[in-house]
């Protein structure tokens, strides 16, 4: 079946007919960007192209969840990665396998906090209460300075500034420990946060 090309607009994509077999339509504006329409009515944005000499379908998300502009921007980003010789699936896999803050804290707690700090259990409870709900399941490299700065400022307004400083110092200690391990190759986002 020949793939139909059209300029993607949300109203047009929503009105695409549902057939007995899945089919694709391709965007005229963004290379390799397609929408797959399933017999169930689900419509999914994909980038379909050769990556390192193999055809790949890289799922971007459903039409219900993404705007056309978001899908185009993500397709351009993926095309750029491929143009630089990278494989987006490998990139996603690396991100998926990257250690989270909570996992790194557990290593830090067992290997450093218990043998070398005064009250490791109190520190653990403080992080479980304040930090884990915010960034516990986030990969270390995905935690931004802005997010931590906002948390520090907000906590300093609600609680004492010393409490906010203590929590950020504990997060910083986890990052400093992580940098010395093979698990993390980034920088410490807490270093640029001004304490109260």
Image: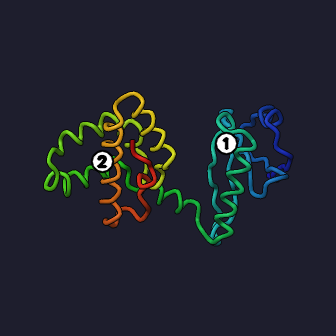
Residue 170, numbered circle: 2
Circles 1, 2 touching at the beta carbon (< 8 Å): no
Position of residue 40 measured from the top left corner of the image (x, y, whole percent): 65, 33
Colour option used: rainbow
Q: Nearer the viewer, mark 1 or mark 2?
A: 2
Label 1, label 2: how far apart the Cα atoms are: 42 Å
Q: Is 123 placed left or right of 20 in the picture?
A: left
Position of residue 52 measured from the top left corner of the image (x, y, whole percent): 62, 71
Nearest to the observer: residue 53 or residue 69:
69
Q: Is 130 placed left or right of 4 in the picture?
A: left
Nearest to the observer: residue 20 or residue 188:
188
Residue drawn 41% across the image and 42% down it: 135
Nearest to the observer: residue 51 or residue 164:
164
* Crowd rating for badge 2 (residues with CA inside 10 Å; few <14, some 14–19, many 20+): some
Position of residue 69 measured from the top left corner of the image (x, y, whole percent): 75, 44
Position of residue 154 measured from the top left corner of the image (x, y, whole percent): 45, 33
Residue 162, numbered circle: none
According to the picture, the residue beneath numbered tag 1 turns out to be 44
Outermost residue toward the front in this view? 196
Q: Identify the element where label 1 is drawn.
A: strand
* Crowd rating for badge 1 (residues with CA inside 10 Å; few <14, some 14–19, many 20+): many
Q: Identify the element where label 2 is drawn.
A: helix
Q: Which of the 4 image quadrants contains residue 78?
A: bottom right
| Above-or-below relation of 19 to 34 | above
Q: Which of the 4 image quadrants contains residue 148?
A: top left
Report the quarter where the C terminus lies: top left
Q: Which of the 4 image quadrants contains residue 167?
A: top left
Q: Earlier in the sequence, mark 1 or mark 2?
A: 1
Residue drawn 35% across the image and 63% down it: 179
Residue drawn 73% across the image and 45% down it: 35
Number of numbered discs on residues = 2
Residue drawn 65% across the image and 39% down it: 62
């Amino acid at each position: 079946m020949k793939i139909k090309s059209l300029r993607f607009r949300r109203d047009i994509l929503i009105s695409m007919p549902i057939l007995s077999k899945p089919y694709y339509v391709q965007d005229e504006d963004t290379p390799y960007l397609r929408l797959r329409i399933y017999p169930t009515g689900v419509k999914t944005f994909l980038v379909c192209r050769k990556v390192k000499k193999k055809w790949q379908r890289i799922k971007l998300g459903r039409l219900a969840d993404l705007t056309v502009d978001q899908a185009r921007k993500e397709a351009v980003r993926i095309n750029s990665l491929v143009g630089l010789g990278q494989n987006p699936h490998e990139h996603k896999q690396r991100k998926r396998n990257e250690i989270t803050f909570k996992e790194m804290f557990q290593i830090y707690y067992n290997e450093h906090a218990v043998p070398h700090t005064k009250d490791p259990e109190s520190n653990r409870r403080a992080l479980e209460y304040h930090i884990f709900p915010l960034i516990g399941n986030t990969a270390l490299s995905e935690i931004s300075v802005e997010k931590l700065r906002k948390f520090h400022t907000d906590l300093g307004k609600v609680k004492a500034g010393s409490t906010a400083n203590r929590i950020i110092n504990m997060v910083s200690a986890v990052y400093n420990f992580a940098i010395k391990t093979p698990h993390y190759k980034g920088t410490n986002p807490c270093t640029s946060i001004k304490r109260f």
